[in-house]
Amino acid sequence: MADKQNQKYEKPKNRKGTMLRLGVYMMKYKFLLLFALALTVGSNVMALIGPMLSGYAIDAIELGKGKVDFQRVFYYAGLMVVFYLLSSLLSYALAVLMINISRKVVYQMRHDVFHKLMELPVGYFDTHQTGDIISRISYDIDTVNTSLSNDIVQILTTVITVIGALFMMVVISPRLVLVFAVTVPLSIVITKYLTGKTRPMFRLRSRKLGELNGFVEEMISGQKTLKAYNQEENTITRFDGKNEEAVEAYYRAEYYGSVVGPSVNFVNNLSLTLVSTFGAFLFLHGQLSVGKISSFVLYARKFSGPINEAANIISELQSALAAAERVFNMIDELPEPADRENALILEHTDGDVRLENVSFGYNNDTPVIKNLNLHAARGRLVAVVGPTGAGKTTLINLLMRFYDTDDGNIYVDNNDIREITRSSLRRSYAMVLQDTWLFQGTIFENIAYGCADATYDEVVEAAKAAKIHSYIKRLPDGYDTVLTDDGTNISKGQKQLLTIARAMLMDARMLILDEATSNVDTRTEIQIQQAMRRLMEDKTCFVIAHRLSTIKNADVILVVNHGEIVEQGSHKELMEKKGFYSQLYNAQFE
Amino acid sequence: MKRVIMYYLRPYYLRMMFGFVIKFVGTIMDLCLPWILAYMIDTVIPQGRQGDIFFWGVVMFGCSVLALVFNVIANRMASKVARDATQAVRHDLFERIMWLSHSQTDGFTKPSLISRLTTDTYNVHQMLGRVQRLGVRAPILIVGGILVTLTLDPVLTLVLVSVMPVIVFITVYVSKKSIPMYTALQAAVDQFVRIIREDVAGIRVIKALSKTDYEKEKYDAVNKEVVGRERKADTTMAVVNPSMNMFLNLGLVFVVLAGAYRVNAGLCEVGKILAFLTYFTIILNAMINISKMFVIISKAVASADRIVEVIDAPPEMLCGVFERLENEDAFIRFEHVSFSYKGGEPDVDDISFSLKRGETLGILGATGSGKSTIAQLLMRFYDADSGAIYIDGEDIRSIEAKALRDKFGVVFQNDTLFEQSITENIRLGRELSDEQVKEAVLYARAKEFVEEKGRGYDKLVNIRGANLSGGQKQRILIARALAAHPEILVLDDSSSALDYKTDAALRHELAEHFKDTTKVIIAQRISSVMYADHILVLDDGKMIGYGTHNELMESCEVYREIGISQIGEGQEVSV
């Protein structure tokens, strides 16, 4: 299992790939980005014009006591006000633009992650913590987002000023620039080395936060159970362990990451030192004037300022990359295999279902279904009974193609279901499962879920048939009552009735009832039986039930044990046989 | 936020001070460099002495090294403080969440609790680290810059400083305005958490009904909402930086104008104004850095408030002092208990019954008639609105929660299996030996499949028990409930996925090995409760029948109806 866990996380990682892919997201907005670049240049130029104007104003003051040329001073002061206003407007525009671009990118990323999530095979969700998925959509994408909206401008500014300043320095003294031939590669090497070293730590940090999230989600979901068993303190202790790991991973990344900024800073300072010392020697040998040294240094400082700033955000950038990587990893998960080319779209089914020599197991070593043959002709009622864990629910997974068979074929109306599009195959079934599922929304929406264009009357009728109407009516908001948070305060039986109502609304030829009424009391069950019968009318039905009274009138009863059909026949036949079924049946009176 | 600073950071004040000092020195070193550089160019180089040039070069190098070392140390100290404080905040938050009462959890909603514990604590963590690392240099530059300009020309400094109140006002005003926006943003993030949890849980239904596109649209709507709120909050905060810039620059214009008058009057020299401008640029850049931090701070304030809201939730369900029943012969007693979840019509109404130690109570009734509510009240997940519940003569409100729950083994309707081994799921943190676990597995009739080839006690249970069938899950849960031989066993519809044979066998095990355990069994099947000592029939929250199977077959219309439908007529049982 440890190997498997590692596999789950340690996917081949490629930072260049991550950057490139982030770039692809950004490039969708390349015109906006160009605009942003123009604004950055503009506001930087403005920033240079301001001091120039103040210089002119000071020239006008310089005339000295009593001779100040106020007209010129006011003229330039006025211009300054105009320019500063413009520059502020520009930088505000730039900020808003960057916010918009990064929102768009982030929206797209979140969108892509979730859309992928919906395409993943059912099995993915059985092995991945919900909290970790949440962490990718919230924390990881947020990190990318923060970095995009703040750091990109910084980097653009750096690039612009560095190029500009370098140009000016080359003009002044190509020889002094040689100093940078030493320090620039040095800072590149240092940055590369350190980021290379810290990269795994930033990855670990994102992963640990994901794990913490997974833990939190699981524990809060099971809070009631934990409370019932007095496990608050134990859980808190376990949480502390995860918390410790998460903050420690965060700290370790920062511990090393925080070296990068000051180190680059150091190299910059080093180049200042070298420039001044080297420049001084050049001066001594008459190669350079003091004035030139001074302006060179001025530019060198212009050069180093933004680099320092950029160095300070390197760790943010790194965590953003690590986070983006996790997001991309999820986007790269293999979805359910695509439907065959020219796959059939089932529109009107007869409801003839046939299984031939079907075998299947969730892991390769333990088969759950072995060599199953079954023919459910149109309108027939097939009941599946057997001890718990005998593979009954698995049958549904196969019928609906949540999983593909290992061996053998399943046909609907003589079409191999692998030749049919998944969505049309699934739509041709209506189903009520043991694990009822309702979402946060009104009761109306929940019932109409499988049939988007259902009218109010239709929904009410379905609810009446499912004997849940009077309960709904008693709620203060009736059908508009919003079910919240897994519908905690409605009983499981009521949930089942709601999902039965949902199935009643659907117009499907095939029906699957997996323990559909296991939590509904028998009286209600009798009351809804008529409706159930109507629901089942003309449909090919697969019914899984323990309460044998509900399936007595099935056309075929399959008795499953250890993944194999041990008996097959009608209730009467099976009882007469006095085999496994009759044992099961009689057990309820023991 | 106040709480985070006043309480969670308090233990680190000293360390933070120390860190600030180190950072301060490092920053000063950084700032010394340009100063030395200026000195070299202005004084040393023109003198042309090689030794001096070399000396100052070494000094500069030394300063660079010190700046490096001190900054790294200070950054690390800052990260450490952020780590420790965040750890404490998160611990307290999780601890509080674990102790929240049910109605409080319902109130906050689980998705919101999850996102508070995750994204909100990240925001705080990030802020604590960043502000400490980046928040030192800027103030030093500002204060230092202002001090230097004061020595140059106090009047001009005053002119410059006069725009400060405007800047402070704008910053504070905008931040104040943006905090609720960030709070709203976090509330929208809760919705992300909700949708993902919901869809992950219902993925089979969603796929079966081909509703993935619908779910995507639903998600996209939330995504749009979140992005919209983010944009709104960020755009609001984006006002700070340019307006700060603008006002400072306007201040500069005033300085130039005032300088012009002063120079004209002979009170000031042009050189000073020039120097003034240089320092001004430094101050300006520092201010810009500060404004960037305000974004992080506002976001963190919103998050911190959400965290503190949970931590400060008043403790509920405390122990009180209630009168003990004298001469009590019953072990569990309900006395006219009524309760409503939402304060409207009672969900259970005037329930009274009593059980002796070792007796079994079966609860039967229609879907939604309040069966589970009785179990929840007995375990004190909620307090009854009226009436009282006694265990062994003591009002349960006077029993400490831990002692109360220690008496129970329970399986809920939607009970949880965790992503742990089967053994750990059964043990659930309690001190139970392997033998006890095995015994429980045996009693719960789970031995056969647990010990099956390819499984075993150490087999990891998948998330939400996905690698187990419904009946297998229930049997593991039952084993969990039985493992500690509880005084009271509550099975809330927990055999619904068991076939009759297993269910019957389980009943035999209970009767044989759990004689002293008082059992409360909620069921749909009459066969699960017909042998109980007492059977309570509920309808719409009210007791409509109470007695043994045979009595109820006689007296209770509803019970008889259920009985006939399930087991046919004329089935009498002898107890």
Image: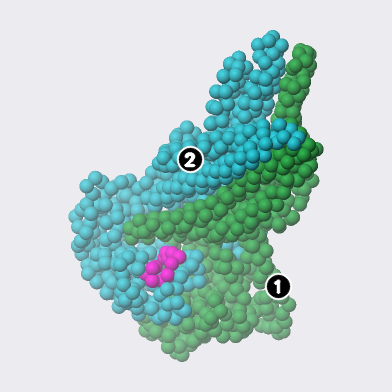
Cα–Cα span, label 1 and label 2 = 62 Å
> x%, y% of residue B131?
67, 45
> x%, y% of residue B348?
53, 81
Residue at x 24%, y 64% (from the top left corner): A509
For label 1, count other residues whose C-alpha is less than 10 Å away and answer few (under 14), some (14-19) or many (20+): few
Q: Is residue B553 magenta?
A: no
Q: Which chain does tag 1 point to?
A: B
SS at mark 1 in the image:
loop
Q: Is residue A103 visible?
A: yes
* Residue placed most toward the observer, A141 or B200: A141
Q: Amino acid at mark 2?
A: Ala
Chain A is shown in which shade? cyan
Chain B is shown in which shade? green
For residue A559, above or below residue B542: above
Quarter occupied by residue A311:
top right
Q: Kindly identify which residue carries mark 2.
A: A36
Q: Amino acid at mark 1?
A: Cys
Q: Kindly identify which residue carries mark 1.
A: B319
Residue range of the region highlighted in magenta in the rendering: A436-447
> In this rendering, would B548 be left or right of A229?
left
SS at mark 2 in the image:
helix
